[in-house]
Image (cartoon, rainbow, N blue to C red):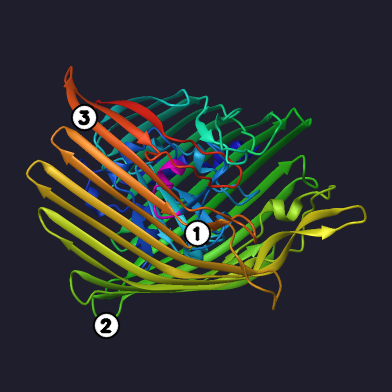
Amino acid sequence: MHLKRVCSIVFLQLVLVGYLCAQMSLSDTIRMDEVKVYGNLRESHSIGATIYKMDSVKLKIFQNRSAAELLAMGSVNLKSYGVGGLSSLTMRGGNSSQTIVVWNGVNIQNPMNGGANLSLFPVNMFSSIRLQYGGSGTIYGSGAISGILILNSNALFSQPNGGELSLSYGSGNTRSLSSQVKYGDKSRAISVKVFGQLADNDFEFRNIYKIGSPKERITHAESKQLGILTDVNMRLHEKLFWSFSGWGQLGDKNLQPIMSSTQPSYANQVDRSLALVSNLSFSPSKRILFNLKNAASLGVIDYSDKGVNIFTNNSYASILTELESKVDVLNNGEVSMGINHTLETASSDDYVGSAKRNRVSGYASLRKPLFSSRFLSVLSIRGELVDGDFKPVIYSVGAEWLPTKKLIFKMNASKNYRIPTLNDLYWASTTYTEGNPNLEPESGWGGDVGFQVKSISSDRAINVSNSLFYSNIERWIVWLSIPTVSDSKWKPFNMSKGESWGWESQVDWSLRVNSLTIRVEGFYTFTHSVFSEQPGSRAQPMIYTPTHRFSGSLNLQYEKYGLGYYHGFTGKRYRDFQSQLPAFNLANLFISYKFNLLGKVVTAGLSVNNLWNQDYQLIAGYAMPLRSYMFTINIDFTR
């Protein structure tokens, strides 16, 4: 039903494309520099925000791995339920539902639980991965409180024609294959990317829950993954651009038992998802741009545990239609406005009937230099109706001042919000759990101030940035245990107030000397994050949020040789209000060699994961591997 609706909308777009093309003469020479892809407009309105973009070397090294494995070596906090298990991202002391995941301009989080399983996101699917820190609810909507993971795959005109094939084999009997092919010209292009992986995941670990911490192997953690992503870009006229992206993903995962369990696990979860995005951009003049976006995010999650005779079927759909416009105003200003309708539905064996939610939002953003071209500012506002109920208007302001070409001072402040998930609202009353249809949205404000120093020359570059951040969230939704006649059950309430503040620092330095390229990166984050369950109650630490986190990397490229060392330190984290997980260091080593074979560039690589053989847990009780290895062969068919 939902897929038919999406296909109908895309078909109507194609009819509109044909009509517009019929009204315009397509010149032989298309001036590509005059056409702007609308996906970049939201980035241009993120003035004052701290943004980090993954470099191409990292994306290449991790291309046969998941986004969860890539981010685990970065500056953010990752929570993972074992090898290949449910993995989620948290930033600046918030929880995973307060950090949204955006793919090609669309929020693809599951509306049932408000999260996204990053272990099912293959890195090779994306041409760009960025992290935006802090709140940005006026631009991206509900949930953008602590940060945003921004994934892009559709910038085809900037990519060369050709393809790649990559094969990997590693510890845990992990077998991976990824490939991508891109073909096109200056007016149309298509790209197809494929990823597949089979893994036993029977890695070694030390079981600290047993006397003597014996070495054991992870059991019942086998996984299968298959994904395909297609992007199409069509420049139909110098004033008309159309893009389409479709991404299907399948994951079949046995869920490993916790280390303290004396019983085998029979739990299994199968995830199927399909995401579709269509953008039609029309620019009648250099100063005006319109964009019609249609998108759908569909998913089916089947959970079973034969050991306790549990079989649960869950499905969801999020259908989006959005009309946006951009108008250049006097003195290099820019106004962006839009209206959005999102329909969210879900069905679950654990729900009271089927869940359905209609959301209509309108937003506007003004980006304009103040006083001079060295002082940039942005002011944004957003309002939303949820099932006819008007939610409080939110707003944000950001500014950047460039006193010199190498120094930038930044600031931004925003009011943000997050509406309850469908699980929060519609979970049926059972022996142990019950939803709460009377929940209110989380609401609060946050901001940060900082500076950035950049210096770039022909053979070297340095980028240093520091920022202080603060966030305050009211009506934080928390599941609490409430007494019943026979026992107790869990139910969500707007009971908590959350507060976090801290400091982020980043250094990025690179140097090129003849055939040698050196790049060094370093990140440090200090985070103080607490919440109170009731007004006046004692503040409690945020679970699984480290106070200190550091990550650094060293990459060397010399002619055909490559060497990379990645190191991350995660400080102590509270697993509950009384006890903590110990701090740990995690290091990965990568070695590569390039050579020519039959006219193609072949790269052979070896990676050593958890180089120092550390014991660690991301979620209490779930074993993570000791030292492991992976060998990769990559063949480049690029013309």
- Between the C-alphas of marks 3 and 1, the distance is 37 Å
Which residues lie in the magenta part? 67-76
Note whether residue 453 is visible: yes
Q: Secondary structure at mark 1?
A: loop
- Asked if residue 113 is among those painted magenta in the image, a careful observer would answer no
Contact flag, marks 3 and 1 (Cβ < 8 Å): no
Mark 2 Cα shell of 10 Å, populated few (<14), some (14-19), many (≥20): few
Q: Residue 412 appears at what percent x and percent y?
A: 41, 73
Q: Earlier in the sequence, mark 3 or mark 1?
A: 1
Q: Quadrant of residue 416?
A: bottom right
Question: How many neighbours does mark 3 have within 10 angstroms: few (below 14), some (14-19), or many (20 or more)?
Answer: some
Which residue in the structure is indicated by mark 2? 371
Q: Nearer the viewer, residue 281 or 403?
A: 403
Tally of marks: 3
Horizontal and vertical percent position of residue 66 = 44, 38
Residue furthest to the top: 598
Is 72 covered by the magenta stretch? yes
Residue designated by label 1: 546
Kind of residue sitting beneath label 1: Pro
Q: Is residue 490 above or below residue 266?
A: below
Name the amino acid, label 3. Answer: Tyr
Mark 2: amino acid? Phe
In the picture, measured across the screen, residue 193 lies left or right of residue 494, that is left
Mark 2 or mark 1, earlier in chain:
2
- Please state if 12 lies on the left or on the right of 590 as rendered: right
Q: Which residue is mark 3?
A: 593
- At mark 2, the secondary structure is loop
